[in-house]
Amino acid sequence: MSENQDTVVSQEKFDEIVNELEHLKTVRRTEIAKNLEYARSLGDLSENAEYQEARELQAATEDRIHHLETLVKSATIMPDNKKKNTIGFGSLVCIRRAGDEATHEYTIVGSEEADMREHKLSHLSPLGAALMGKKKGDVFTFETPNGKQTYSIEKVA
């Protein structure tokens, strides 16, 4: 993610990011500081594996804090789509690929929330972008690495 690019998230995801950030800045930083103090007390820092591990954990935590702070500053909270018959941010869609019997359900979310295991599809992904603005019954085609795919929209909620 570019540092100056807005990130679109739901209110739920924004709250989750803020909670994680608060936890890292308060609880996790304190735990790491205690681990560093203990590791320092063990003596020679140049050959102290516990100290090196604590420093690496501290660096990773600070990187995560920076990332989350950037997200919070640049986040645009997108309300769920109010037009329930048109696909938009927060819509639950059921689609069927041409020639298949099986249907697939996805919720349209921001890229920070996208998770295919949870059937959360980014509005910026090729399929997500192709779905935006469509309605139940629409048939659409979009480009994939394996060529063009054609789908129909079975349900929009």
Image (tube, helix red, strand yellow):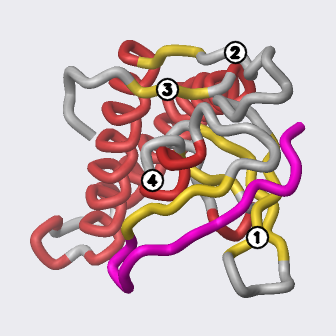
Mark with earlier residue (4, 1): 1
Rendered residue at 29%/64% (across/down): 51
Report the quarter where the C terminus lies: top right
Check residue 149 for magenta coloring. Answer: yes
Label 4 to label 1: alpha-carbon separation: 17 Å
Please state which of the two labelled residues, at mark 1 or mark 2, is closer to the viewer. 1
Using the image, determine if residue 78 lies above or below residue 144. Answer: above
Mark 4 or mark 2: name the one nearer the start of the chain. Answer: 2
Q: Which residue is mark 3?
A: 8
Reading the chain from its start, which is encountered first: label 1 or label 2?
A: 2
Residue bearing mark 2: 79
Residue at numbered disc 4 = 125
Of the residues shown, which amino acid type is indicated by label 3? Val
The amino acid marked with disc number 2 is Pro
Q: Nearer the viewer, mark 4 or mark 2?
A: 4
Q: Secondary structure at mark 3?
A: strand
Mark 3 vs mark 1, CA separation in Å:
27 Å
Q: Is 11 rendered above or below residue 64? A: above
Q: In the image, what residue type sits under mark 1?
A: Arg
Mark 3 and 1 residues: CB-CB less than 8 Å, in contact?
no
- x 74%, y 21%: residue: 81
x then y, percent, for residue 145: 33, 79
The residues tagged by marks 1 and 2 sit, at their Cα atoms, a distance apart of 26 Å
Q: Position of residue 37 (x, y in %)?
A: 38, 47
Front residue (pair 147, 137): 137
